[in-house]
Amino acid sequence: MPSARMTAQRAAITQMISDQKGFVSAQQLHEQMMVAGQKIGLATVYRTLQSMSDDGELDVLRLDVETLYRRCQTSSHHHHLVCRTCGRTVEVSGAGVEEWARSVAASAGFSEVEHTLELSGLCAQCSIRAAKT
């Protein structure tokens, strides 16, 4: 259950992130909001995205240099296939991954283990484009 109250700024950020096709950074989202005429600070965008992430409303990809956000399409545990060229993202489940994670954790004496898995590659369209060059 979301813990933050719905302010006008949070509503605007929620709408903007919901309109995205793939993952975006806080800076990209802020820039899009400014272009759309929304007057909102970058720090507010960062705080709101973090809050939404903490509430389980957003998927998060942590890359070497930045964090990317995307509105969850499903509320159940899932993983991602992400095109490293265009950013197209597909949510996938992976029973084998879940069993492997439980097994590895148990063999090391861990419990209540959480995990994320992102697979990156080329989507079908980007694969076709890459083959033509």
Image (spheres, rainbow, N blue to C red):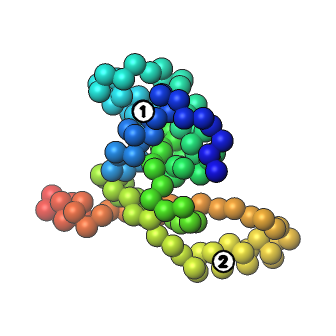
Q: Which one is nearer the viewer's eye here, 18 or 102? A: 18
Residue 12's mark?
1
Q: Residue at x 78, y 65 (%)?
A: 112
Q: Position of residue 96 (x, y in %)?
A: 58, 80
Check the image and report above or below for 52 versus 103: above
* Of labels 1 and 2, the one closer to you: 1
Q: Amino acid at mark 2?
A: Trp
Q: Which residue is the site of mark 2?
A: 100
Check the image and report above or below for 98 versus 89: below
Q: Secondary structure at mark 1?
A: helix
Check the image and report above or below for 120 versus 59: below
Q: Amino acid at mark 1?
A: Ala
Q: Quadrant of residue 35?
A: top left
Tell me the quarter of the image containing the C terminus: bottom left
User: Mark 1 or mark 2: which comes first in sequence?
Assistant: 1
Count of numbered tags: 2
Q: Residue at x 66, y 79 (%)?
A: 99
Residue 120 visible in the current orientation? no
Q: Residue at x 65, y 62 (%)?
A: 115
Residue 101 visible in the current orientation? yes
Crowding at dot 2, Cα within 10 Å, few <14 / some 14-19 / many 20+, comes out as: few
